[in-house]
Image (cartoon, rainbow, N blue to C red):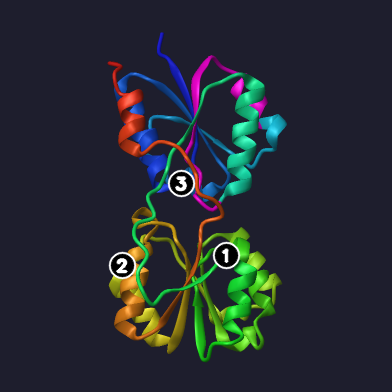
Amino acid sequence: MKEELLIFGGTAEGSELARLLPGRGYRVTVSVATDYGALMLADCAADVRVGRMDVVEMAELMGSRPFLAVIDATHPYADQATGNIRAAAEIAGLPYRRLLRPEGREEPGWLTAATAQEAAQRLNALPGNVLLTTGSKDLAAFTAVEGYQQRLWVRILASEESLHQTLSLGYPSNHIIAMHGPFSRELNLALLRQFQIQTLVTKRSGRAGGFWEKAEAAREAGAALLVIQRPSRETGLTMEELLAEFGGKTP
């Protein structure tokens, strides 16, 4: 009987794990919050569960099968989800492993903010058009930017949920760029030039999150780069360390 692993996904690395681990002899269940997350796993041999859960529901899922361990592969900015997964693993009595996404070096010239709210305050002191690439969850904070409906362009996932949320906050439809990544340096650069962007706002999501393609495009376009820092310094395992721990099985 195959040993079983439960992955909470939402990142490229989580999808990669979900594809690799079944081939190493594990039965894998992946929990994702959205239909988009499930779409990214359409060709995966893992069992996929879709929907947001609270701590109790997570603990119930963890207890529903004889899982060997829980792997938290959620986004590095999803600190609430990570806290809930860790708490649920404690309730369920399962080993918890956090998959880390390297963030890379910090370069001179970046503008930084601790939160989306602080980034919005900084934008009030900066001139010109702005491209937000932080996702739909933080868009409410940027309505505090003076003239946000004229100054801000937002790039979001092409999903009904994201589009509805963005429009409900008052962002005009002609300032919404709904696309699925990955986004190349060339595409980022084209958007910056098309909309005469002077500041690009992003999260420090690492190479897997397309951060460096955005940073390079901003530098080439002569735009400022405003980086929202990660909410916490985490401890955990790299992809290589996780695969070393769970890589010794055979089908």
Label for residue 39? 3
Q: CA distance from mark 3 to mark 2?
A: 21 Å
Confirm whether residue 42 shows in the render: no
Q: Earlier in the sequence, mark 3 or mark 2?
A: 3
Look at 60% across and 26% down and name the residue there. Answer: 89
Q: Secondary structure at mark 1?
A: loop
The span shown in magenta is 58-77
Image quarter (top left, top right, bottom left or bottom right) of the C terminus: top left
Work out whether residue 182 or residue 161 is closer to the camera in this orientation and state it: 182
Look at 32% across and 76% down and name the residue there. Answer: 217
- Disc 1 target residue: 114
Mark 2–mark 1 contact, CB under 8 Å? no
Which residue occupies the extreme front position in the image?
Answer: 108
Look at 46% across and 46% down and name the residue there. Answer: 39
In the image, residue 239 sits, relative to residue 168, either above or below, namely above
Residue 48 magenta-highlighted: no
Q: Which mark's residue is nearer the viewer, 1 or 3?
A: 1
Crowding near the residue tagged with mark 1, few <14, some 14–19, many ≥20 C-alpha atoms within 10 Å: few
In the image, residue 163 sits, relative to residue 101, either above or below, namely below
Q: Is residue 4 left or right of residue 89?
A: left
Q: Secondary structure at mark 3?
A: helix
Mark 1–mark 3 contact, CB under 8 Å? no
Confirm whether residue 169 shows in the render: yes
Image quarter (top left, top right, bottom left or bottom right) of the N terminus: top left
Q: CA distance from mark 2 to mark 1?
A: 26 Å
Quarter of the figure with residue 20: top left
Q: CA distance from mark 1 to mark 3?
A: 31 Å
